[in-house]
Image (cartoon, rainbow, N blue to C red):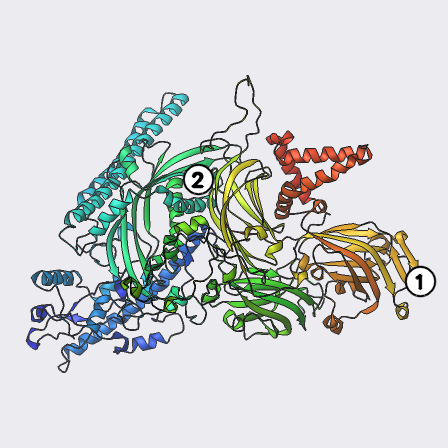
Amino acid sequence: MIVSPSSNSISSPVLVDLTPLPGEEDKQIFYPLDINSIDQVEKDKPLPAPPTTATAPSPYGIMSSANHQGDGHSTEFPELPPVPPSRVIGQGYSANNPVPTVQQYKVEQKQHEADAQAYADIVERRRIEAEQREKQAQQEKEKPTAQEGQEGGAVRAGKDEETNAVKAQKDKKDEPTPGTGANEKSRLMEQMNANQLKPTERFQRAEKGQRRVRDPITGAEVIVKDADPKDFDPSIPATRGTNALYHAFPPPRPVSVDAMIDKLKLLQYVVFGSMFVIWLSVSFGSGFFKLIWRTILCGTVGFVLMTLISLVERGLDKEIERVRQDMGRQRGEAFSPPIPESVEWLNGLIKLVWGLIDPALFISVADMVEDILQQSLPGFVDAVRITDLGQGSNPLRITSIRALPDQPGDEGYPKSGWINQGNENIKSKDTAGKDITEDEAGDYYNFEVAFSYAALPGQGAQLRAKNIHLLIEFFLGLYDWLHIPIPIWIQVEQIFGVVRLRVQFIPEPPFVRNLTFALCGVPAVEVSAIPMSKQLPNVLDLPFVSSFVKMGIAAGTAELAVPKSMTLNIQELLSGAAVGDTRAIGVFLITIHHCEGLSAQDNNGSSDPYVVLAYAKFGKPLYSTRIILADLNPVFEETAVLLLTMDEVKAKEDLAVMLWDSDKMSADDLVGRVQVPVEELMLNPNEMRRREDKLMGFEDANDMPGKIVWSIGYFEKAPLIKDLERGPTVEEAKAAPDPPKTAPEMEMLPQDAAPNPAKKDLPPPPPDVQKTKPDPKWPSGVLSIILHQVNNLERQNLEGASGDREGEAGQDTDQPSEQSENLPSGYGEFLVNDDMVYKTRVKQYTTNPYFEAGTEVFVRDFENTVVRVVIRDSRLREADPILGIVSVRLSEVFAEASSVTQVYALTEGVGFGKANISFAFRGMQTTLPKNMRGWDTGTLEVSQVSANIHQDKTHLFEPKASRLRVVTSEKVETLPKKDAEVQGNSMNWDLDLLRLPVYSRYQSSVVFEIGKGGGPLSALGVGAKPDAVAVLWMQDLTDDVEQQVKLPILVSSNIQNLKQNAINDQTKKFHDFEIVGELTARLKLDSGLDEDHETIRQGQSRRHALEAHDHIEGEAEIARKQARFDDDGVIDKNEQKQIDKAHKRQLESRGRGLAQVKAYRSAKWMMRGVKDRLPGQKKTREPTVQTEA
């Protein structure tokens, strides 16, 4: 209800602010209330409810007219995008979630500034509207017929959360309000007097830098601003400045302090002027050398004095801030016993627990800050690492806590839009394939916490250790010629921020499942930096140290600021659950068949098309087909697999199939695209569907000529089979709790009859991924690899001992030290079936690198998959040596479980250590044919090649002695025509076993080119082309099985284009060719790498994969071959040369021999770089390796 003033005591209304939200002072609901009528309000009645401003009429129609403007001058706030999916703690960095950097944070800051400016413009336009409405209301009030108590000057609240006070008055209109009385009345009067501001004044005093975002906790729109200690306004009780004690926090700054600081600044100018006058007085008239000497002396003395004054000024300012914070802390602790509404009881609990927390729990925080700093280093700093982190005994403090909307009992509770982002029909599934309802079950409690931290006053070394601190080492270098560690003690001086939390309560122990939290803007953090020692002066204002560390912390916390959020599964944490299941909920199996009628993008009237698959909003290409040159009707027949997670589902992604034209000299042109919602593709799971779609342009209304024919199927995770779950071990059986008794059993007496045991039986729990092996029926699926940490990582000490060695230990057996000069800079590489799929970030100069990095990939057959995790040492101007390798076969890893976390020893490298790695596999409900379950890398063996020409086609191709070329994308083998034998219509070639290395096997073909034709220069290889070809796409071969294949021999006027296409009936429709015979050959695809791959030019990722293969298998295989050299009793010169070469290679791969000399390693690295850049040598295009950096 609204309390109307009496006609004989009319006074100006006071605007009462009902508990504003953080940064939302200009978005609250205000209503008029006569301050003189406060005595007439019954103390048992609630405060009057505000009017509904959404339908409030606009006197001049300003709101309605402005709301319909389309020129950017509307006063309506634009619709906000949905919140991004909440990150899960322990998820690690990936391509979707790269390591934050300071540079990236600065870009986000500019975007925030643009959003804040747009919001400020709308607020300004609303201010003008409010002024005009206020003037209109004043004019209507002065009229004789004006109604008393009519609402006026109400500010349009906009689309936002309702405060709890408003909701309480709506829902409890007839209930008494407790706690009223003289004290409550005086407190209300003070609060009302403190907020006697007109709407125009509130708009003018609105905080700068505010921006609208969608809150991931409540799903509502909120106004946030990056925290700043200067903006902590004690007059705003519900935001950051005050707790329930209703005391200003922090206490007001003494005015005398500012005057003193101004005097110190003035003193600096006085010192400067005095030194300048002294210099003028003594520098001239005594010769040139004395002039130089006195100038240097005066300048140095002046600089030192001004620096000392500046340090005193900054120290005084900081000490005052510490004292203010400490006053607030002491007052809160003093008032906490008699004030139960205060959060000081919680601060007392935090103070008690703070010193008991193991600093090891903060390793992940230090790791995040270290990664951000490492990715943002300037050029003259080689590396940075955090060597120590301590929380001290001075705890973080809670300044206020308040509940947020959407609580149990509210109208419409629970609003589930923020839970599933509107995708109510798509749910996650458990290991048994049943829908998981726990993520949306139970009740939710939303609340907001304002927190602060301030270092203790004083600068003593003992006091510094009581505050939050880090010890950071910066390694200064000049192109790696210098390597100077600079340790810097970083002390956290102040932290101010607000965090919103959503806690999910469930009926089963531990009664809490998910905790989701999001920061309301980037918290304000202030740090001090003391170089080398804790006793040296504070150098906070050094530009590099202060800005770099603060920006690094800001960049990390920005990843948790609204609309982003983080989710912690407390239920799994308390139960000790391991990594568990994969994040992928299914896969899309896609086959690109062919395209028809594409538009010509090149001047020659053709195009060079290729197809790219991606999720439209994410944008990053996830798969690309081969390029087919000069073809408007290409036939691809390529199959790809895309992983699908709940992130794409919640974001309502679209699957984009984009057709591009490849250009050499300019950017590629869009030929057309098809975009299909992911939800639509999931409607018919576990079956393939053929589609034929017309191409669209960048806009859906922009039609493009042509169509694409493709097949797609969504395949879900295969449920685990309960029968495959292993029984508990002896230790697990002893530790298992006894089954609980039912209520009837607990009340039974010895003579009572037993209850029906069937009533007690409940459905069995779903299979445990850590005890249930994968179903062999579904060998294809998603593999998750996570590298958690490497313990005791160190290089081998390969330096020889000198001096008197008698009686000394042969090698160092001490534990690795973080202070050693031989510290490695480790990073990890993941190899799946000899293909590199992932690379972690570099962890500089540490013996215990903490990664928590991983990826998920599709494996075609887990029973025939080998995974290698390679740990390398990152070095400049030399190749990165292998510190150690973990090589596992998935058939052995998943012999008893679908998820395994284990510590593996690093072997076959120049270092030592133990890697903590998690593997998880979930099969998908699809059965690929055997030829599609092979490796993507291998070696093709070719033998017994012959051709038979049809008798009726001899006029198209005459059987004669002809050259034969066997062509793959990596290598070409040529057999001259003298090796050909012709018998009638048959041709045979005398050849030894050919071995051709193969990469990207499922996108590649082997082409048999017969004969050589062309123009007059064809004899020199210019314009030469084969007379006929036979093409085999290697996806049709089965791994490690020798097969005899029969291929059609084709002749065509455009044979170069023909051999790029898959040959089928569709190819015949648009490509002119004739089948003149059959080519027969014996082929075998030997899976994996071998020494044949060393003969081709490679990039870094493939070269690293080959090095890892050599360490594990290659060198042993070479040794086995060379062991047979002595079978005839004689080792000839060529065999001895091979033995010496292999020995030298083995020494260098282990960092011994000449490889112990850094100059040799650098020279070899330079020679490899020069060789890679030499023209004329073919280099294949390598797929991009995923990385978290």
Under tag 1, what secondary structure? loop
Q: Given the image, on which type of amino acid does mark 1 rest?
A: Gly
Percent coordinates x, y for residue 590 in the rendering = 60, 66
Under tag 2, what secondary structure? strand
Whether 977 is drawn above or below 171: the answer is above
Q: Residue furthest bottom?
A: 145
Percent coordinates x, y for residue 1169 in the rendering = 65, 41
Estimate how packed mark 1 is, as few (under 14), some (14 to 19) or many (20 or more) residues with alpha carbons within 10 Å: few
Tell me which corner region of the image, top left, top right, bottom left or bottom right, holds residue 437: bottom left
Q: Which residue is mark 2?
A: 385
Q: Given the image, on which type of amino acid does mark 2 rest?
A: Arg
Residue 418 visible? The answer is no
Q: Earlier in the sequence, mark 2 or mark 1?
A: 2
Estimate how packed mark 2 is, as few (under 14), some (14 to 19) or many (20 or more) residues with alpha carbons within 10 Å: many
**Mark 2 and mark 1: span between their CA atoms?**
76 Å
Q: Total number of numbered labels? A: 2
Residue 939 visible? The answer is yes
Task: Please state which of residues 869 and 226 is positioned toward the viewer in this rendering.
Answer: 869
Whether 130 is drawn above or below 641: the answer is below
Who's the residue at 19% across and 54% down the image?
A: 342
